[in-house]
Image (cartoon, grey):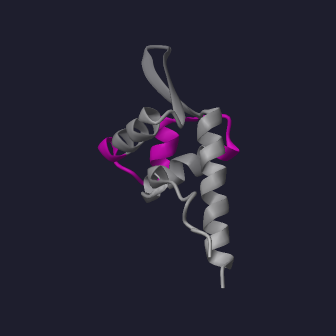
């Protein structure tokens, strides 16, 4: 039997990181407050998980000002999208394995 968990990526082990990538896979981008609201995460928790995904180049961070307010938005990188698809495919294979 092949190693069926080979493509399960540790970067997506936590539910917040899994949620961030899931949101970014179906949206062009999401800002900090949107991610926070959708995931029910605290500021610090979300910040640490986005930083972890940014560190492995799975997401890109863009900071700007809207009026006088700072706005941080996140986008999935090409690498991030590829790795997330591999991760989901590996989970599907694991679930279907009998």
Q: Is residue 59 above or below residue 67?
A: below
x then y, percent, for residue 6? 55, 60
* Residue placed most toward the observer, 57 or 48: 57
Q: Is residue 36 magenta?
A: yes
Left or right, residue 47 beside residue 22:
left
Q: Is residue 32 magenta?
A: yes
Q: Do we see residue 49 in this rendering?
A: yes
**What are the residue bounds of the magenta stretch?**
25-45
Most distant residue in the bottom direction: 98
Q: Is residue 49 above or below residue 75?
A: below
Image-quadrant location for residue 80: top right
In the rendered view of the protein, which quadrant contains the C terminus? bottom right
* Residue placed most toward the observer, 73 or 48: 48
x then y, percent, for residue 58? 53, 37
Q: Do we see residue 38 in this rendering?
A: no
Rendered residue at 43%/19% (across/down): 69
Dominant secondary-structure state across the stretch colored magenta: helix
x then y, percent, for residue 30? 57, 37
Rendered residue at 45%/54% (across/down): 10
* Residue placed most toward the observer, 33 or 56: 56
In the rendered view of the protein, which quadrant contains the N terminus? bottom right
- Total marks in image: 0
Left or right, residue 78 beside residue 38:
right
Rendered residue at 48%/53% (across/down): 12
Image-quadrant location for residue 75: top right
């Amino acid at each position: 039997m092949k190693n069926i968990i080979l493509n399960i990526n540790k970067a997506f082990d936590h539910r917040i990181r899994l949620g961030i990538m899931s949101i970014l896979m179906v949206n062009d981008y999401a800002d900090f407050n949107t991610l926070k609201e959708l995931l029910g995460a605290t500021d610090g928790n979300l910040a640490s998980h986005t930083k972890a995904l940014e560190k492995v180049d799975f997401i890109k961070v863009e900071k700007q000002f809207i009026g006088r307010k700072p706005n941080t938005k996140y986008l999935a990188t090409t690498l991030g999208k590829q790795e997330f698809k591999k991760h989901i495919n590996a989970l599907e294979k694991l679930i279907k394995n009998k």
